[in-house]
Amino acid sequence: MALYQKGIIRDDVVHFLRSAKELGLYVVCVNTLKVKNPDRYSDVVDCYIEKYNYGRDFGSYKSGFGYLYSSGLAEQCPRMMLVNDSVFFSRKHNMRFLEEMFGSTVEALGATENYEIEHHLGSFCIALSGEVLNHPKLKKYWKNYKCTDVRPVVIKTGEMELSKTLKRIVSSPDNFKSLYDIERASTLLHSDDVVLEDIAHLSRNSGLSHWPRFSFSSVSKEVISKFLHSPASIAGVSALNADFDSLSEVEVHYADSLTGFSEFVCGAVTNSSSAGENIRTTVKGEVISNFIGCFAHGSQIHQNGIFLHRIGLPIIKLDGVYRGMFISNDIERLALDLEPDQRGEFRWIMYSRPFGGDVLFGWKRAAFYRGLI
């Protein structure tokens, strides 16, 4: 685990490491700051390394892998996971997540994936088989990796190049994937009516990113254009593009669940008495299709943070507000889905890094929007 912890290690990180130790895992932590009395964490950390703060997370990864190779631990390791503390660890899901990551036979398994620029695994959490860990190409990658603090370079030569290296190493394409991928999301939505019913509340609210967001409004337009036919206007359709100032002039229907939305569509269709069941099946399919279409854009952990936590992913990206992917509504929904005693710590961490576009000025603001900081 790559750490950036000063004085003490965050409680959520300690909880995650404790879960790892309960599973019998060997824990190596590389910290770029200083912790007072590291021995106090000896029950959850087997090897603690401090290094100069340079190179971001990949600088720490390089040191960690160097230790595994030089100490001979890599040769004894059947499976390992690299992870960093740029995420918040939800105690609710830690144990099951670790069991899945270490119990899987996938040779290079990320927690989530990223479709921005090109497909790659999120480097904040990847599990590797012993064969991949000890492969000459991976050893060469870490030996040749040049540390840098320049964010775009780290993304290119670190996150992106690591995924390319792993793709070359694995024995088949299906051995390079993420645990919470599109297929898992789609399968769950088709089988879990409880999650599907609440889908509107599990979708990102922030409009600061250009990535598409799920909404019943966008589903309505698809259903209308594909399935509904009338020489006159359909009841409720005119509300699709209405704003609050004009809501009193049109007929609207509030719906925050799949059932409520299906009833709205049925109520707007003349022959719903005979086609009701077909309409509900069609609406359900369109809702899943629209959500999955949005799910597949950009960084999965940012785009789908609320949904992913609800279905079992314990890690929440700490830069969600700073990057404009979360707004306060999103943070509150995530907080209420955590264990009660973790909510305060989570809110404090997330709200302490407000959106960069609001608080940065001058060259820092320009650098932020170009992804340099």
Image: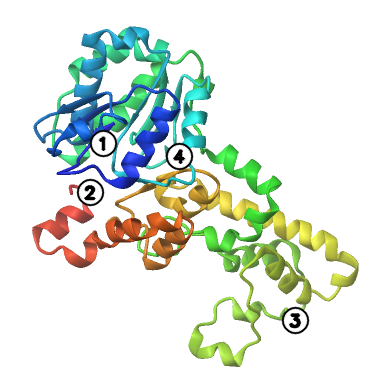
Measured Cα–Cα span from mark 4 to mark 2: 31 Å
- Where is residue 294? Give x, y as percent: 51, 52
State the SS at label 2.
loop
Can residue 312 be spotted in the picture? yes
Residue 208 at what x, y percent from top left? 35, 63
Residue 23 position (above or below residue 224): above
Residues at circles 4 and 1 in contact by the CB criterion of under 8 Å: no
Q: Please, what is the three-letter code of the amino acid marked with disc 2?
A: Gly
The spot of residue 323 in percent (x, y) is 29, 55
Nearer the observer, disc 4 or disc 2? 4
SS at mark 4? helix
Of marks 2 and 3, which one's residue comes earlier in the chain? Answer: 3
Mark 4 residue type:
Asn
The residues bearing labels 4 and 1 have C-alpha atoms spaced at a distance of 26 Å
Residue type pointed to by label 3? Ala
The residue tagged with tag 3: helix, strand or loop? loop
Residue 78 appears left or right of 173:
left
Quadrant into which the N terminus falls:
top left
Evaluate if marks 1 and 2 touch, with contact meaning CB atoms under 8 Å apart: yes
Mark 2, residue position: 371
